[in-house]
Image (cartoon, rainbow, N blue to C red):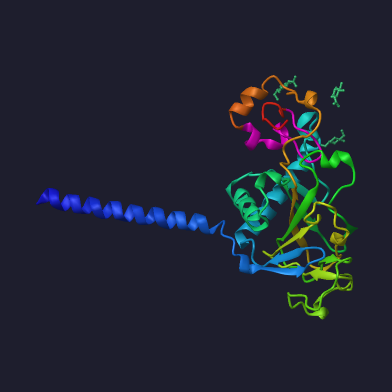
Amino acid sequence: MRSASSKSSLLVLVVVLLLLTLLYDHNSCNASLIDPTKSKQISWKPRAFVYRGFLTDQECDHLISLAKSELKRSQVADNLSGKSTLSEVRTSSGMFIAKGKDSIVSGIEDKLAAWTFLPKENGEDIQVLRYEHGQKYDPHYDYFTDKVNIARGGHRIATVLMYLTDVVKGGETVFPAAEETSHRGLNIMDEDLSDCGRRGIAVKPRRGDALLFFSLHPDATTDPNSLHAGCPVIEGEKWSATKWIHVAHFDKIYGNDSDCKDQNDSCERWAALGECTKNSEYMVGTTDLPGYCRRSCNVC
Ligand SMILES: *[C@@H]1O[C@H](CO)[C@@H](O)[C@H](O)[C@H]1NC(C)=O
Ligand SMILES: *[C@@H]1O[C@H](CO)[C@@H](O)[C@H](O)[C@H]1NC(C)=O
Ligand SMILES: *[C@@H]1O[C@H](CO)[C@@H](O)[C@H](O)[C@H]1NC(C)=O
């Protein structure tokens, strides 16, 4: 009798554990779930889409807090001489978050790949930017015309702009060269837009929303309609995160193989310890600066 009851309580325990595992798996799946019906086309020339609620509040806050601490750290690190200073890539109001830096960043990158149908490896590090009052980005293209910038991963094919905060007024992303169609798809009332935002098809920044647009046509030629700008912030503060995606693997350097060298004798050991992912800025490098252990990290 006793053994039968302990057997049944064991069974109950096993069932409960199984249920918990299922529940847990279900939750972690949800984190990277993409619902295509939430993606709305806002323009066909250029091809541009908005996904409402792409990021959760937690993900937005996480990106902002990573950026804030990095900016602080950079200010301290600026005075350090040598390599770690050289590996810093940022503007006064922005910074890059290394790919797969933590599970939240990695989860966002999984969602980006699922939404865009473009592989994770083709993406650059996420760049987080803060625009304060009056700050803007004038109209520009995300594709390059020089050879240096397309050496890593080839052309940029697409860009995803993720809005991390609401902006009271201004700060729209506008496509001044877009071909206007009869409907804008997003029910933006014109009076909500700044003057700058009225100069084309505009997306009003809304916390959690993401904008995807393509800089290349499907035949891989550059799309001049993809000209875009960040309108001046008139009221409030705008935080955004950008993912630029290339036509090929971004971490592989195409070109001269004889440049493929480690620059420190410890590279092989560090790579074996997983530093290529844990410390990719130093090991692999960034958009502007190659890292010190590219050979051991197999990126050249
Ligand atoms: C940083 O370096 C500059 C010039 O070398 C020096 O004037 C300044 O005091 C240093 N700042 C700190 C916090 O060490
Ligand atoms: C590769 O680089 C080396 C030196 O860095 C140079 O001598 C060689 O000509 C280059 N090869 C090509 C194909 O560019
Ligand atoms: C290799 O890295 C170590 C640790 O950062 C450093 O002390 C050393 O000077 C480096 N060696 C070279 C040749 O750069």
Q: Quadrant of the C terminus?
A: top right
Q: Magenta stretch containing residue 2, yes or no? A: no
Q: As displayed, is residue 174 above or below residue 75? A: below
Name the residue: 77% across, 52% down. 157
Q: Position of residue 123 (x, y in %)?
A: 71, 47
Q: Position of residue 170 (x, y in %)?
A: 83, 69
Q: Quadrant of ligand 3?
A: top right
Q: Quadrant of residue 171?
A: bottom right
Q: As displayed, is residue 62 above or below residue 181? A: above
- Part of the protein shown in magenta: 275-292
Q: Is residue 291 left or right of residue 226?
A: left
Direction front: furthest residue: 219
Q: Is residue 285 visible?
A: yes
Q: Is residue 52 left or right of residue 218?
A: left
User: How many numbered marks have been drawn onto this rendered protein structure?
Assistant: 0
Direction left: furthest residue: 1
Frontmost residue, 169 versus 69: 169
Q: Is residue 159 left or right of residue 228?
A: left
Name the residue: 77% across, 37% down. 77
Q: Magenta stretch containing residue 282, yes or no? A: yes
Q: Position of residue 224 (x, y in %)?
A: 88, 59
Frontmost residue, 8 versus 245: 245
Q: Is residue 136 visible?
A: no
Q: As displayed, is residue 247 above or below residue 57? A: above
Q: Position of residue 63 (x, y in %)?
A: 67, 53
